[in-house]
Amino acid sequence: MSEDNIICRCEEVTEGEIREAIQNGCRSITEIKLWTRAGMGICQGLTCTRLAERILCEVQGISPMELEKRYIRQPLRPVSLNSLVR
């Protein structure tokens, strides 16, 4: 792959940015997400997480089974007070 390839389309994060984050100490998908915002767009990582995991495994020389478990949180939505009263 090329350093210019877009990995996260929602946040326009490139492969080079993910590799740079790993070189700067990111050792999990959560850390890459916090460093680059990959996976924080409207798709919530459905498109880019597996690509970022593959890059992380390649750089670290590990298998996907050795990756730290990801914690998926559901998006929050505001609730009106009227809907709670009824």
Image (tube, grey):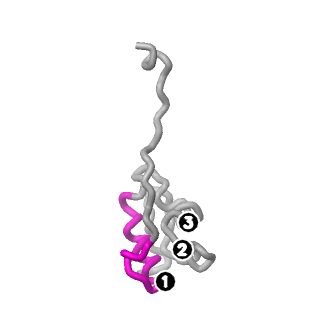
The circle on residue 31 is 3
Horizontal arrangement in the rendering, residue 52 relative to residue 35 (left or right) = left
Depicted 47 relative to depicted 67: above or below:
above
Neighbour class for label 1 at 10 Å: few (<14), some, many (≥20)? few
Dot 1 amino acid type? Gln
Nearest the viewer among 58 and 43 is: 58
- Residue range of the region highlighted in magenta in the rendering: 46-67
Dot 2 amino acid type? Arg
Of the image marks 2 and 1, the number of the one nearer the N terminus: 2
Residue 82, image x and y in percent?
Answer: 46, 16
Q: Main secondary structure of the magenta part?
A: helix
Name the residue rendered at 54%, 74% in the picture. Answer: 27
Tell me the quadrant of the picture where the C terminus can be found.
top left
Horizontal arrangement in the rendering, residue 37 relative to residue 73 (left or right) = right
Q: Kindly indicate whether the residue at mark 1 contacts the one at mark 2 (C-beta within 8 angstroms).
A: yes
Instruction: For marks 3 and 1, give the CA distance.
Output: 14 Å
According to the image, label 2 marks what residue?
27
Reply yes or no: does residue 76 show up in magenta.
no
Q: Secondary structure at mark 1?
A: helix
